[in-house]
Image: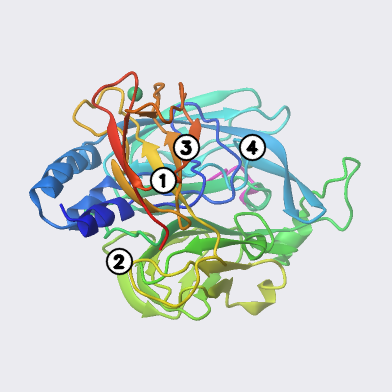
Amino acid sequence: MTTTEIAAVAAIFVLFTATVAFFEAGAANKSDVTNLQSQVSSLESSSSSATHTALQTVAQASQVAPTARHITLVAEPATITLATNVTYDAWTFNGTVPGPTIWANQGDTIVATFVNDFTTMAHSIDFHAGQVSWSADYQPIAPGQSETFNFTVDYPGVFMYHCGTSPAIEHIADGMYGAIIVNSTKPLPPAPGGQYVLVQSEFYLNGKTGADGNYAGNYTKMLEGSPTYVVFNAKANGYVAKPLPVLPNQLVRLFILNAGPNEWSAFHVIGALLNTTYIDGNPANAEYGLQTLNIPPSGGAIVDMYFRDPGGKNPFVTHQFEFVPKGDEGIFLVGGATSTTSTTSTSSAAAAEVHVSIPQGSEVNTAGPGYAPATITVVIGVNNTVQWTNNDVAPHTVTAVDKNFDSGEMNTGDTFTYTFTTPGTYQYGCAYHPWMQGTVIVKAAP
Ligand code: CU
Ligand code: CU
C-alpha cells in the first residue's frame, strides 16, 4: 500500500470533535458537536489493493451484520446556556440539548429504554426511525417510570427523536429532541474533510428570568411562532464563537436535523454550494448543486460538500434572515493546505484532532481491528493530536507496543488523547484483547 493509499484509508475516519455516541449507559457527554462514529463501510470506495481488500472484508462484516443496540434515554430537567448570560430551564434527554446522537446501521435492532426522571411531569419518546405502535410504545410515561421496546431501523437517514407528550410543541421547544442517524447498507464515499451533526431548533423565552435565574419557555410565543432564538445545537451563534474546522478540497459531510418545532430551515453556506444533498439522509434521495436546502420541521439531510480556499471562513446560516440575528449562524474554518500545494499558512487554523473509535463489539469481534480507523496518518502542526473514544460496552486500552503511550483502562465513553510530536510509525493495541491493533503514522510538519 502506498503512502497515499494509507492516507486515503486513514482520512476516511478523520473526525474533529468530541463524540457523543453512546450505547449502553446513556451517559452522554455534554458536547455541542457530535461526531460520526466509525464509518467502516466507507472503505469500500477506496482503492483495491490486496490490503484494502482485507480491510474491506472486515469493514463490510462489521457494517452490514445487523446488531442489537441498547440505548437509554432519560427525560430529565437541566439548565442549558443558550447565549452569554442566558440560561434556560430545559427539558432534556440525558441532560443535554440536543439529546445524544444515536448511531446505528440499517437493519439494526434498537432496544430502547426510556426513563422519566421528572418528578411531576409525564413524558414520552417517539423515534422517527422506527415503525411501531404509537398507542403501545410512544405513550406518556409517568414520573419515575420507564419502558423498553424494540424496533428495527429499516431506512437509512438522519431522523428525529423527540418527546411527543401533549402539547408536543412545548416538549420539543423546551429541548426534548435529538438525532438518530442510520448508516445505509450502501455506504457513502469517505468524507475526510470533517463531519458534523447540526441540529437547528427554536427557543421561546419568557420576558424575565425565574427565581432560579433561568429563563423558561413561553407557551404563547411557541403557539404564535415568534422565537427568541433560532440556533444550531442549542447555542446562539455558538459556531461563530467557535468555528468548525474543515479541510480544504476534501469532502465534508454534514448531518443536519431541523428539530423545529415550528420553523423551516433554509440551510445555506456562504461561498459554497451543496455538492450532494441526500434528502432525509437517505442515499437514494440525492440532489446536486443546491444553493439552499429546504428542511421541514422534523426533517433531516446529509450534505456532502467542499471548501475550495484554504485558510478561509465560510459562514452557514438559515437564509430566512429574520433568524440570523436570533443566533442561527455558524462558521466553517477552512484549514490550510493538505495534500495540494498552497501558499496559505496553516498557522491561522487551529490544529485539528483526529478521532479514533473503539467500536461496539470490539471485545468479542476477534476479526475486527478494534480501532476505527485502524490506521491513521497525522501531520505535525496540522492534526497531530489523536483522541480515542471507547464506544464499546467493555473496557479497553490504547497501549503503544513500545509503551511510549498508554491510556490505562478506558471504560465505556472514556477518551484518551495523545499528541504525537516525532515523525514515525507507531503501533499500538489493547492490553486486554490481542486482536485489537492500530497504527499511527506521524509525518513532519508541511
Ligand atoms: Cu416531554
Ligand atoms: Cu480491548
Q: What residue did someone put label 3 on?
A: 135
Q: Which residues are magenta?
A: 161-168
Q: What residue did someone put label 2 on?
A: 285
Residue 130 visible (yes or no): no
Sequence-earlier tag: 3 or 1: 3
Image-quadrant location for residue 234: bottom right
Q: Secondary structure at mark 2?
A: loop
Q: Which amino acid lies under the numbered mark 1 shown in the image of this protein?
A: Thr
Question: Which label number is shown at residue 422?
Answer: 1
Q: Can you tell which of label 3 and label 2 is closer to the viewer?
A: 2
Where residue 417 sits in the image (x, y, percent)? 49, 38
Q: Which amino acid lies under the numbered mark 3 shown in the image of this protein?
A: Ser
Q: Can you tell which of label 3 and label 4 is closer to the viewer?
A: 4
Image-quadrant location for residue 426: top left
Where residue 431 sits in the image (x, y, percent)? 34, 20
Q: Which amino acid lies under the numbered mark 2 shown in the image of this protein?
A: Asn
